[in-house]
Image (spheres, rainbow, N blue to C red):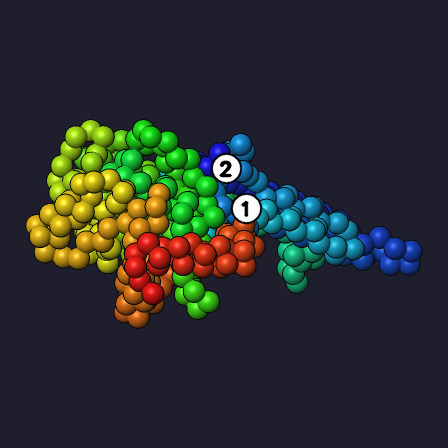
Amino acid sequence: MFVDRVQIEVIGGRGGKGCVSFWREKFVPRGGPDGGNGGHGGDVIIRAAAGVDNLAALGQKKHWRGGNGEGGLGSDMHGKNGVDYIIDVPPGTLILDSETNLLLKDLINPGDQVIAARGGAGGKGNAFFKSSDNRVPREASPPGDPEKRLLVLELKVIADVGLIGKPNAGKSTLLSRLTRARPEIAPYPFTTKHPNLGMVVVDGERSFVLADLPGLIEGASHGVGLGHEFLRHIERAGILVHVVEPEPLDGSDPLENVRTIRHELEDYAKELGQRPEVLVVSKAELPGAGDVRDLLAKELNREVLLASAATGLGLNTLLNAISAKLAEHRARHAPIQTRVPPHLRAAQAEIVPQLTADTDDVDDIDGEQ
């Protein structure tokens, strides 16, 4: 099960108590105070780890606590500090304070971490209070209170390229053809309920992570159809590939669908409307797909590609266009370090020959050499 938003409570460990003790030894009648300090409580640390893909593990446990510190002992022995508790989350996770909605940390890259709740300080033993004016202190300070927070963890998928479009536009089929990813595919809308990632290898030197993002509908920027749940994943993508269905099942106009999606992106975040985009008409095997491509190119005054995941028509041209657009974007911006999940990295060696074969087939269909 894919989980991209959870609420948890984090509590630092309790500090250990300070010790009240006096040195007692034969022939040393006035040894003096020797009570040690208590150990500090352990922190709760949230860390981005490359081997984690979603927040499902946190959905089963709502309370996380650091280890408690041990109390001080005589002979000036300090108590042992509590063990820090580390929570591993996927790179791209936002840590938000549930009460104030303030962003505490954006864990973008593997290894990024934040102390979510500090443990309580250990109490001071009576040896700490020894002075020339107070040679026999019989007091010890109580341990400090640990921090306690209610947090919201929100995952925004990190990918180089994001597939967007109306439901049932053919995004999942396109992802399955270009990568080894196997998203759910069915002839009805909203089969994609969470992002799916796949590694696309264009050649020996060019590759990128492609994300199939759930379909958008009108009003998504205001939360309609779980719009906010879908749109937040688009924010991480370097460039967008807008997939347009030539003959929508609901009888809608492809041109209006393009404008609707653009409006929802701009309404959600102005920067999304300026994100580099490749526009492609899917399902090129349908008789009217070419006419829809020509209409969109004329009305929008921009290049519109035509591709078919079923037959392979135009996939090679689409890959080259995405690679060129992505290269331009990377040259102008310092890119977020893209997380490549372990299962994608492990399969990359196998993906290269597979995609090369697919690309060769596409060349034959396109008539390109």
Residue 140 vs residue 352, the one in the foreground: 352
Report which residue position mark 1 lands on.
87
Amino acid on which the number 1 mark rests in the picture: Ile
Q: Secondary structure at mark 2?
A: helix
Count residues near mark 2 (Cα–Cα under 10 Å), then give few for <14, some for 14-19, many for 20+. some
**Residue 151 falls left or right of residue 21:** left
**Residue 28 falls left or right of residue 122:** right
Residue 14, by quadrant, is: top right
**Residue 133, how many percent across, how many down?**
64, 59
Q: Secondary structure at mark 1?
A: strand
Instruction: Give the mark toward the camera: 2 or 1.
Output: 2
The residue at the far left in this view is 299
The residue at the far bottom in this view is 331
For the point 30% across and 46% down, the residue is: 308
Q: CA distance from mark 2 to mark 1?
A: 12 Å
Which label belongs to residue 128?
A: none
For the point 35% across and 57% down, the residue is: 364
For the point 75% across and 49% down, the residue is: 73
Amino acid on which the number 2 mark rests in the picture: Ala
**Residue 49 falls left or right of residue 165:** right
Report which residue position mark 2 lands on.
56
Residue 328, by quadrant, is: bottom left
Residue 296 vs residue 310, the one in the foreground: 310
